């Protein structure tokens, strides 16, 4: 297969022409397009078109037809095709560079590498499936094929490392708004990085960065959302859920992704222009965990109980212990105090 060289092709990304083929079919659902026309439009031979149709089918896209009659798809497939995303993201920082994978180890891993190689602010890494999706502290993120949104955003903010926690909050607020808007559900945010629906985790955020003491070189905000999982694996089903489980309906991932990224852009710009105060205010308004909630804090070796006392000026959680002392938490897993099990 001869993929047209991209500025710098990233190993494993979906071939450009495969994406072009998918975009062509998606733009004309129901319409039968001849193999010859497709071949001409995307600049390959008819036998290559046939091979790629076979690949798309293997990837779960329902393409009807055959080489003699032409091809069509019954409806726009729910694949996060860069060309479709790009069109719906005009005016944001994201259309410049979108790396799409049908299967990858971790979009955060790829985005960190892209950061090191000098890729621009706003670069997006998206996967239909992750084989080693990661959570915080070396934990795993379950990333079922085609069911979730697994994406990482590369950012080059003029911020210092101590200002970075606000970026996780920006991601959380973007997920919160996008999920609420699309589903009509009322989510909650559990500091710092869990978005919950009906008490179960529907999304998690992993922020990783390369920084010098006084300056962030680049940062990757990785977002995972459970969208169309019919059920969650047994090990996490007590604590995890999906939009489909909660609403009873399959949800279009592409719309959710666009809503998420547009809101991310807005909150991010607000953070850069106004500082963290409005982000922290919004977080405090929507998170039931921010203030006055009795929680258990597991941080490093220690676990203790306390009552949340809002966020500090950089977005860290304040917790008042039973002895009256208030502490600022840098990183921790928190859960309701009555609930002994941590996720
Ligand atoms: C997180 O970690 O919540 C961060 C998850 C970030 C995932 C995205 S996907 C795109 C990008 N690329 C990556 O490789 N990662 C990011 P943490 O707070 O440590 O939560 C992890 C814990 O959540 C696990 O130990 C499980 O208990 C639970 N868990 C795992 N998969 C889950 C899922 N799909 N939904 C809900 N909970 C899950």
Image (tube, rainbow, N blue to C red):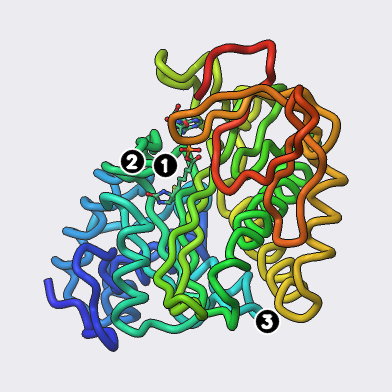
* Left or right: 106 as drawn, with respect to 135: left
Mark 3 or mark 2, whichever is nearer to me: 2
Q: Give the percent coordinates (x, y) of residue 69.
A: 30, 57
Q: How far apart are marks 2 and 1 (CA)?
A: 6 Å
Residue closer to the observer: 103 or 105? 105
| Quarter in which the N terminus is drawn | bottom left
Mark 3: secondary structure: loop
The 10 Å Cα crowd at callout 3, few under 14, some 14 to 19, many 20 or more, is few
Residue named by callout 3: 91
Q: Is residue 39 above or below residue 138?
A: below
Q: Decide if residue 84 is in sight here.
A: yes
Mark 3 or mark 1, whichever is nearer to me: 1
Q: In this view, does 273 lie above or below 311?
A: below
Residue closer to the observer: 219 or 249? 219
Q: In this view, does 68 lie above or below 340?
A: below
Q: Give the percent coordinates (x, y) of residue 112.
A: 35, 67
Query: Of marks 3 and 1, which one's residue comes earlier in the chain?
Result: 3
The 10 Å Cα crowd at callout 2, few under 14, some 14 to 19, many 20 or more, is few
Residue named by callout 2: 138
State the residue lying farthest toward the bottom.
7
Residue named by callout 1: 135
Q: How far apart are marks 3 and 2 (CA)?
A: 35 Å
Q: Decide if residue 185 is in sight here.
A: no
């Amino acid at each position: 297969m001869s993929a047209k060289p991209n500025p710098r092709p990233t190993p494993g990304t979906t071939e450009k022409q495969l994406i072009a083929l998918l975009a062509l079919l998606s733009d004309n659902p129901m319409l039968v397009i001849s193999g010859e026309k497709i071949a001409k439009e995307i600049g390959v031979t008819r036998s290559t078109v046939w091979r790629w149709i076979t690949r798309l089918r293997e990837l779960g896209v329902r393409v009807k037809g055959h080489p003699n009659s032409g091809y069509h798809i019954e409806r726009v497939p729910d694949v996060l095709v860069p060309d479709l995303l790009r069109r719906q993201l005009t005016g944001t920082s994201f259309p410049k560079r979108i790396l799409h994978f049908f299967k990858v180890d971790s979009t955060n891993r790829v985005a960190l590498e892209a950061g090191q190689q000098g890729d621009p602010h706003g670069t997006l890494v998206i996967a239909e499936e992750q084989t080693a999706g990661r959570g915080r502290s070396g934990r795993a993120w379950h990333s079922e094929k085609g069911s979730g949104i697994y994406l990482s955003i590369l950012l080059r903010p003029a911020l210092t490392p101590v200002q970075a926690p606000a970026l996780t909050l920006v991601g959380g607020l973007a997920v919160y708004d996008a999920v609420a808007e699309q589903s009509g559900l009322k989510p909650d945010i559990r500091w710092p990085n869990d978005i919950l629906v009906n008490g179960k985790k529907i999304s998690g955020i992993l922020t990783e960065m390369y920084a010098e003491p006084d300056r962030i070189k680049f940062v990757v905000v990785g977002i995972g959302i459970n969208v169309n999982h019919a059920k969650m694996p047994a090990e996490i089903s007590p604590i995890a859920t999906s939009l489909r489980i909660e609403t009873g309906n399959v949800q279009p991932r592409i719309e959710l992704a666009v809503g998420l990224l547009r809101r991310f852009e807005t909150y991010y710009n607000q953070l850069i222009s106004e500082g963290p105060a409005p982000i922290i205010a919004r977080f405090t308004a929507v998170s039931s965990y921010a203030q006055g909630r009795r929680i258990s804090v597991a941080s490093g070796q220690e676990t203790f109980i306390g009552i949340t006392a809002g966020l500090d000026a950089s977005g860290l959680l304040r917790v008042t212990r039973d002895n009256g002392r208030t502490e600022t938490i840098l990183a921790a897993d928190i859960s309701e105090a009555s609930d002994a099990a941590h996720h």
